């Protein structure tokens, strides 16, 4: 089945004032880039998609994920993963613990050893072999970003949102991390929305770009 | 998902539901603030009503069902009533004022200096010392044969024998004022520092202070003109709580105050506990008088606040940059040293009494050091110690769980608790406990007469809850909401986000709140005495009883145990986070 994320007739309001309206369909593996100055409603769009719109914001419209309307579902049942500019790793858990937290309990990897093996494999794939027991606060910024990516991917999301995910990394690291993230999105055929104000991000995403104005 | 209810019509295709009211956990969470309100309002208001009715002679239990002013008539005819009221007002007001002024002086003189943190570290342990233990320590220090007269005898005073003297128990309440001031000063100071520790407020105030310094204001003047006007509103509630407590407490006046006559609160307590049940009508009338007295003091304070604000508003912008700053700096430094020295001396004296064998008067040190007093105290301490700890744990655990659920409700609904709820949480701190506790005890006796343990634990909860809430709220509200969002987007249910993401992040603040809750419960005297009907003995009730009459050495041992118990809690709260749920910054890797 072709996975897709669809935004149907969204109108997003701040304090009753129209902030943005959007009607988009993103196929699996595609990355929609949303650009605009701060205050244009980029982050609010992502919050609406995940169901965490703060007070003061209102919206009408629907989110459809793989032909299912998820607009009425609470965040944890939507299966929409988010990557922020900070890795936001849980510092009370190890690197492996952070990823295990995200992995759903299914029959396939219900036993502890299998889960652990899967985590190790995934870590090795992104060049973090053997780092499972490390404390996340002791990793470099690039390593943390990669763990955050793995955490999101292994939660088996149906779509991914990127909230300026590379803006805190320096140039070379930014290119590498971005390449890795986009590769994974394409391999897993996930629809993705990226919010950014960096043109090189938009170029690398190689998809539709939407500019929001204030 | 957050659809606006105003747009329901435009949004007919999707259902509008609150995303957080979806499972059992979120339902429990969203109900918890209402439960909290009931839990606090019912006992306090119920207790007040149950004091109000007997005050007007309506006591069915005593076959008094005609409303009359007999209780008040009896009250007015009590010999020495004026002195009792005056003593309560003077001790409450003067001690609060002294503690407040000294808090301001210390803040002003040491704002942005390393000394402020040092003073904070020195004084914060005082916060956990129960009032009764502090009173015992202060009493020992100023007694005719206490550390003071020993230090100056005989070389300065010429005393070879312990002199007669009026301290403690002086008729003017000076000892009470001293005890209360020393106990409340650290509380107010730490509340102020707590407000300054809020990231935004603290940063803003430090910048304002710096700007004032750059404009040529002297440090103390800069504090009073650029910091205090913004800081004061954050101190108002703690000050009023201190004022309410100081004007109506019984521990300090019982241990340090005069007996002929004592303060109003102590007298009321004696009437209530009298075997003559008819005295209860007079006592209830007295409780109302106490309520009016405390309410009047609070009103007076708020009024004075207004007057001071109006009078000094002009001074804020008169451009004067120096009001004898250097002199005040010296005075404050000296005063701070005296206060800290006083507290240290009191504590040292207490420890020495607890291990003293034979100790002749002018000698500064005891001639023998023995552990006998500890040994004999420990053999009798089993039950009180057990009661203290179990009641503390029960009330604290309940308070912590309820507080966490309420704070979670706040985050799930994305609406802060209403002002009304926040005010109600502090109700037990502002209403004099003597005024509602007796009513509450009568109510508890109506409901069930047998479970004294439960009654005590429940009554403790009323006093533990505000402090636990106060201590946890700011850390909980400061949590980065994105962690919860990330966890939810990874598929974690609200219950899992709460238990596995938020609670571990709050491990250290929760432990501090637990230690604080335990300390508050350990220190309760009047609630324990009344709700337990005298049947539940704790370390604190024993310490107060022993302070009046029993040997000074046994009394010192109990006071030390009283201090040690909460201290153990705080040390654990400080150590445990270094080993569990530690963040990388603390680990040695």
Image (cartoon, grey):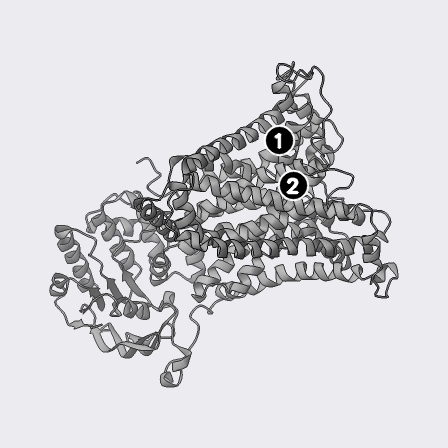
Which residue occupies 22% across, 60% down?
Answer: A164
- Residue B241 vertical placement versus A160 (above, below): above
Q: Where is residue B397 in the image (x, y as percent from the top left)?
A: 57, 50
Which quarter of the rendered picture does the N terminus of chain B lie within?
Answer: bottom left
Q: Can residue B505 be seen in the rendering of this structure?
A: yes
Mark 1 Cα shell of 10 Å, populated few (<14), some (14-19), many (≥20) = many
* Residue B125 shown left or right of residue A5 in the figure: right
Mark 2 Cα shell of 10 Å, populated few (<14), some (14-19), many (≥20) = many
Q: Name the residue under label 2.
A: B388
* Residue B279 shown left or right of residue B444 in the figure: right
Using the rendered view, name the quadrant where residue B255 is placed. Answer: top right
| Pointer 2 chain | B
Give the CA distance from mark 1 to mark 2: 14 Å
- In terms of depth relative to the viewer, which is nearer, B550 or B584? B550
Q: Is mark 1 on a helix, strand or loop?
A: helix
Q: Position of residue B499 (x, y in %)?
A: 45, 54
Rendered image: mark on residue B560: 1
Mark 1–mark 2 CB contact (< 8 Å):
no
| Pointer 1 chain | B
Which residue occupies 26% across, 48% down?
Answer: A120
Asked if labels 1 and 2 share a chain, the reply is yes
Looking at marks 1 and 2 on the same chain, the residue that comes earlier in the sequence is marked by 2
- Residue A23 vertical placement versus B190 (above, below): below
Q: Where is residue B576 in the image (x, y as percent from the top left)?
A: 46, 39
């Amino acid at each position: 089945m072709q996975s897709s994320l669809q935004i149907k007739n969204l109108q997003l309001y701040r304090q009753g004032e129209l902030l943005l309206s959007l009607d988009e369909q993103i196929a699996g593996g595609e990355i929609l880039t949303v650009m605009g100055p701060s205050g244009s409603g980029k982050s609010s769009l992502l919050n609406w998609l995940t169901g965490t719109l703060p007070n003061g914001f209102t919206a009408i419209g629907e989110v459809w994920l793989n032909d299912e309307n998820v607009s009425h579902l609470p965040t944890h049942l939507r299966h929409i993963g988010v990557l922020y500019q900070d890795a936001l790793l849980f510092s009370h858990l190890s690197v492996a613990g952070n990823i295990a937290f995200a992995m759903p309990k299914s029959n396939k990897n219900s036993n502890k050893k299998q889960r652990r093996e899967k985590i190790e494999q995934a870590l090795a794939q992104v060049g973090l072999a053997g780092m499972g027991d490390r404390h996340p606060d002791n990793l470099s910024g690039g390593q943390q970003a990669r763990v955050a990516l793995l955490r999101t991917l292994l939660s088996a999301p149906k779509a991914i949102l990127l909230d300026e995910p590379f803006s805190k990394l320096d140039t070379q690291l930014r290119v590498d991390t971005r390449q890795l993230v986009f590769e994974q999105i394409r391999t897993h055929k996930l629809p993705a929305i990226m919010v950014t104000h960096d043109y090189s991000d938009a170029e690398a995403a190689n998809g539709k770009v939407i500019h929001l104005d204030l | 998902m957050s659809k606006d209810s105003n747009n329901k019509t435009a949004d007919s295709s999707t259902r509008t539901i609150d995303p957080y009211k979806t499972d059992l956990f979120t339902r429990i969470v969203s109900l918890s603030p209402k439960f909290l309100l009931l839990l606090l309002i019912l006992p306090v208001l119920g207790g007040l009503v149950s004091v109000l009715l007997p005050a007007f002679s309506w006591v069915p239990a005593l076959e008094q069902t005609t409303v009359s002013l007999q209780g008040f008539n009896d009250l007015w005819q009590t010999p020495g009533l004026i002195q009792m009221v005056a003593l309560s007002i003077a001790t409450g007001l003067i001690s609060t004022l002294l503690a407040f002024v000294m808090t301001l002086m210390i803040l002003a003189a040491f704002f942005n200096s390393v000394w402020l943190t040092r003073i904070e570290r020195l004084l914060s342990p005082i916060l956990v010392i129960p009032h009764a233990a502090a009173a015992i320590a202060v009493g020992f220090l100023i007694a005719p044969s206490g550390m003071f007269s020993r230090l100056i005898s005989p070389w300065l005073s010429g005393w070879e024998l312990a002199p007669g003297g009026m301290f403690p128990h002086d008729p003017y309440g000076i000892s009470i004022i001293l005890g209360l001031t020393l106990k409340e000063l650290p509380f107010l100071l730490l509340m102020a520092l707590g407000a300054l520790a809020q990231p935004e407020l603290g940063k803003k105030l430090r910048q304002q202070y710096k700007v004032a310094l750059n404009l040529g204001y002297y440090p103390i003047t800069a504090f009073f003109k650029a910091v205090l006007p913004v800081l004061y509103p954050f101190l108002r509630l703690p000050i009023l709580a201190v004022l309410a407590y100081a004007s109506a407490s019984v521990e300090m006046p019982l241990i340090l105050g005069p007996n002929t006559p004592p303060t109003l609160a102590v007298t009321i307590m004696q009437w209530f506990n009298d075997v003559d049940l008819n005295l209860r009508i007079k006592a209830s009338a007295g409780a109302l008088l106490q309520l009016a007295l405390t309410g009047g003091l609070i009103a007076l304070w708020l009024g004075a606040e207004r007057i001071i604000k109006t009078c000094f508003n002009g001074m804020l912008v008169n451009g004067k940059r120096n009001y004898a700053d250097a002199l005040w700096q010296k005075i404050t430094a000296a005063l701070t040293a005296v206060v800290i020295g006083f507290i240290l001396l009191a504590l040292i004296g207490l420890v020495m009494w607890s291990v003293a064998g034979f100790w002749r008067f002018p000698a500064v040190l005891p001639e023998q050091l023995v552990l006998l007093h500890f040994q004999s105290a420990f053999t009798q301490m089993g039950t009180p110690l057990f009661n203290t700890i179990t009641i503390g744990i029960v009330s604290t655990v309940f308070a912590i769980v309820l507080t966490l659920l309420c704070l979670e409700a706040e985050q799930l609904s994305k609406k802060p608790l209403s002002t009304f709820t926040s005010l109600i949480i502090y109700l037990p701190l502002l209403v004099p406990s003597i005024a509602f506790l007796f009513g509450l005890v009568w109510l508890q006796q109506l409901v069930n007469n047998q479970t004294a343990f439960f009654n005590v634990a429940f009554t403790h909860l009323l006093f533990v809850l505000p402090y636990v809430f106060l201590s946890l709220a700011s850390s909980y509200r400061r949590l980065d909401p994105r962690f919860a969002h990330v966890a939810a987007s990874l598929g974690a249910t609200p219950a899992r986000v709460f238990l596995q993401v938020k609670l571990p992040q709050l491990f250290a603040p929760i432990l501090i709140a637990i230690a604080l809750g335990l300390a508050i419960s350990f220190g309760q005297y009047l609630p324990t005495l009344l709700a337990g009907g005298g049947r539940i003995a704790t370390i604190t009730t024993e310490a107060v009883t022993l302070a009046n009459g029993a040997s000074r050495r046994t009394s010192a041992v109990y006071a030390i145990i009283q201090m040690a118990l909460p201290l153990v809690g705080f040390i654990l709260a400080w150590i445990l986070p270094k080993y569990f749920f530690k963040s990388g910054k603390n680990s040695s890797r």
